[in-house]
């Protein structure tokens, strides 16, 4: 059986939609061929919109991707170019914020700035002069983190915290604030109660904190450091 005609019928459905719009020198839409200075090619799929801008001679100016949602937020790797055709920037976006690598260049093509972002915040930056020689390095201090982040920490506490029978019988609850040390290798130490409620609740909160798996250690100047942390442990009826 020949499936070719069937596949050809599906092809318009499977291929992303594409549209080209032309603009004059002031970036206003135009249908006049003599006024065309730039054009934008927009490619749309069910999940993504990609917009590529060019000079009328085909030289690229930008290549940006967005989510195909009403909010239309930046998503994926986005690039821009100088008027001379040299790459100006290459930046990774996730849900509208820079997340990952951000690289910028001088107009001569040499590296200008190379950064790593974590959900919109730079955590490592390298600066270069116009000859491409590194001139300065900067690192953001990073707080210690439970493996898997806050959601995983909440799940760990919910799964391991046991309500003391005496406190449950007395209908006593409250929030115990526990302070502890995260060492350079992520292990937990120096656990103590900063804000107590009652002895059995305090003891249970300390027990859960001491039993935690190793955390991702905090960093200062890109080196692991010891870091004091505090957590509220809530016993609710």
Image: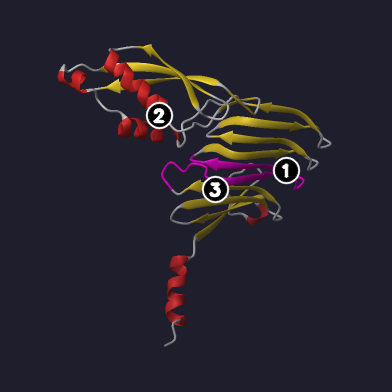
Task: Report, in whole angstroms, how far the alpha carbon at label 1 lies from the one at label 3.
Answer: 19 Å
Query: Is residue 81 magenta-colored?
Result: yes
Closer to the observer: label 1 or label 2?
Answer: 2
Closer to the observer: label 2 or label 3?
Answer: 2
Q: Which residues are magenta?
A: 69-95
Residue sitting farthest toward the right: 131
Occupied quadrant, residue 149? top left
Q: Are marks 2 and 3 in contact (CB under 8 Å)?
A: no
Quick check: can you spot residue 106? no
| 156 relative to 92, above or below | above
In x, y percent, where is residue 96?
50, 38
Q: Which mark is residue 211?
A: 2
Residue, disc 3: 65
Task: Report, in whole angstroms, how far the alpha carbon at label 2 lies from the one at label 3.
Answer: 44 Å
Closer to the observer: label 1 or label 3?
Answer: 3
SS at badge 2:
loop
Q: Which mark is residue 82?
A: 1
């Amino acid at each position: 059986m020949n499936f070719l005609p069937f596949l050809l019928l599906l092809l318009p459905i499977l291929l992303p939609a594409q549209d080209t719009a032309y603009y004059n020198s002031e970036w206003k839409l135009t249908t006049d061929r003599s006024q065309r200075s730039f054009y934008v090619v927009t490619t749309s799929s069910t999940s993504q919109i990609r917009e590529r801008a060019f000079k009328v001679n085909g030289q690229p100016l930008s290549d940006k991707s967005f989510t195909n949602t009403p909010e239309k937020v930046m998503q994926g790797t986005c690039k821009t170019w100088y008027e001379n055709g040299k790459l100006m920037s290459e930046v990774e976006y996730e849900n509208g914020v820079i997340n990952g690598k951000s690289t910028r260049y001088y107009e001569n093509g040499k590296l200008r700035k190379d950064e790593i972002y974590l959900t919109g915040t730079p955590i490592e930056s390298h600066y270069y002069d116009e000859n491409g020689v590194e001139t300065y390095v900067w690192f953001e201090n990073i707080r210690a983190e439970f493996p898997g982040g806050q959601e995983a920490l909440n799940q760990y506490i919910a799964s391991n915290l046991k309500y003391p029978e005496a406190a449950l019988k007395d209908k006593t609850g409250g929030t115990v604030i526990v302070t502890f040390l995260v060492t350079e290798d992520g292990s937990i130490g120096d656990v103590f109660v900063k804000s107590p409620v009652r002895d059995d609740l305090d003891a249970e909160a300390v027990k859960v904190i001491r039993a935690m798996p190793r955390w991702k250690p905090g960093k200062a100047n890109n080196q692991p450091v010891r870091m004091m942390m505090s957590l509220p442990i809530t016993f609710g009826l």
